[in-house]
Image (cartoon, grey):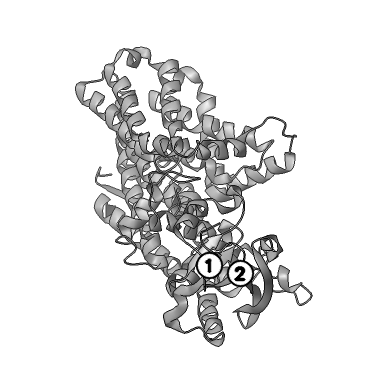
Amino acid sequence: MSINRLEIFGNLKLTEKKFLFFIVFINLLLKALPASLVELGNDEVYYWTYALFPDWSHFDHPPMVGLAIQLFSLNLTLNSGFFIRLAALLLSSANIILLFNLVKKLYSIQAAYISSLLFIASVYFNVICGLFILPDTPQMFFVLLALVYGLPALTTVNPTRKDSLKIILFGLFTGLAFLSKYHSLFLWFGFGLYILWNDRRWLKRRSLYFSILVTLLMMIPVIYWNINNNFVSFTFHGSRIGLFNSPLRPDLFLQFILGQVLYQNPVLFVIYLLTLFSLFKKGRNVLTGIEKLLLCLSLPLILIFTLVSLFKDTLPHWTGPAYIGMIILSSGWLGGKLSSYRRTVINTLLGANAVLFLILLLGFIQVNYGILYPPNKNEEANQLGTKDVTLDMFGWHQAGLKFQQFLLKEGIEQKDFNKVKIISNNWFPAANIDFYIAHPLKIDLLVYGTLAQTHKYFWINKTRKISAGDKIYYMTSSQYFNEPEKLSSKFGQIVAKDTLRIRRNGKTVKNLFIYQMMDPRAIAGSF
């Protein structure tokens, strides 16, 4: 078998470049369709506001996802769902290539091919942060870059000056990953654990401390923003994972475990468990340096959030980056099995990818046609759609057209749309309303509520003023219905005006309720 060719699918032989081009192009093409046709979800439109109102940092995440959206949409010149998601499509394609070359260097060409197929089969890596635009999207790109330089350098037998430079680059890319999501610092935790466990020689190398300094310098924008905003980001996230005074919640633990299995792909999760079993069976003294390091990078983060899930509602994607280590380890393990169990390995990889694209297909059909959770005729109008989370990504463009027709019926000409204000009560679905309804019509949207409800809109509100003569409408969705009475202290009268019925497959699946807020008691200013 040639080092440049892998006979992996019967008699079909592919060079590395042809394989990578083929698999990256096909994967990109298959994701481009839902990226174009499925509306942005609650989180995605919210991160669009990061690009619309850039800052050193933001309430719940660092600035990188907003910068990525700005870059790939040409600073929102191309302000459509596809171009907002373009960063995810292209960075995930780059991730496949980075991972391939890293695994080839660490293990073998066979393992490199396998790693690409494992990565594409992962719901988290290929869909959640490879199709949807989230902070995880740039995070995984920089995490992989950090590993490309850090893994070979840290595990080399005799570190050279070149390895010292690679460790510094590791610090740089870890800092950039931190500017995407805070818990990217797990990279340093894993490296530190490995150094203390396996190679304390690095404690004597100046390059290690210079690398830490580089990471700290990259953190300055986030620290600066938080200093000016009472460290609100850290207190917010601290409240989400704090364990004190929290009762034991086995239901949340089981939900978290199931979520991780589904987010990674059930087939991949079985492969991870088999890989771990084989490694622990070998024993600590037989493990290679790279295996020890990858375990240090993967298991602590997974175990920490698993512990948190026993007490708090924990989201499965929080552990997502840790599984890149499991993909690398599993690639090495399967690569070693390929000569003896080729057909089994190939069928498993193909099966895992079939599961992934079946999930994509069923998700696309559900969002656009609603094969699950059909609307219940007996369901209250203000509760319609509450059981179908896929409606978060459906009907907003339709709602924008209907709201424009509503304004025209109200006697408001298009040239006067800028004198209209929309009010919502929570950051979601406020961001959906903002992107699909308010922004295209050049209407300002404000969110009224606590900081936990408004999130970034607490700062956006300060740039959007209510003026005398403005027509003010409150909008709420049946999925997240909230009566406007909480705003009664700010308005003398609240009048129900209209209901926008959102239809899918000829059936009304959710409603948007419009109220007019009359006689505002605080005209000038924002909430």
Does residue 435 sit above or below 300 in this rendering?
Answer: below
Residue occupying the point 58% across, 75% down? 369
Give residue 290's position: percent from left, percent from top: 39, 27
Q: Is residue 478 visible?
A: no
Q: Is residue 439 visible?
A: yes
Q: Which circle, 2 or 1, is nearer the viewer? A: 2
Q: Nearer the viewer, residue 509 or 110?
A: 509
Does residue 142 sit above or below 190 in this rendering?
Answer: below
Query: Does the CB distance between marks 2 and 1 fall below 8 Å?
Result: yes
Q: Identify which amino acid the numbered label 2 is placed on.
A: Met
Residue occupying the point 48% across, 64% down? 40
Q: Nearer the viewer, residue 425 or 500?
A: 425
Q: To which residue does mark 1 refer?
A: 433
Number of numbered discs? 2
Horizontal side of 154 relative to 454 (left or right) equals left
Horizontal side of 345 relative to 215 (left or right) equals right
Does residue 384 sit above or below 189 in this rendering?
Answer: below
Q: Identify which amino acid the numbered label 1 is placed on.
A: Ile
Q: Nearer the viewer, residue 467 or 322?
A: 467
Horizontal side of 499 relative to 353 (left or right) equals right
Label 2 to label 1: alpha-carbon separation = 8 Å
Extreme-right residue of the structure:
378
For label 1, the SS is: helix
Q: Name the N-terminal-most of marks 2 and 1.
A: 1
For label 2, the SS is: strand
Picture disc at residue 475? 2
Extreme-left residue of the structure:
161
Does residue 279 sit above or below 525 in this rendering?
Answer: above
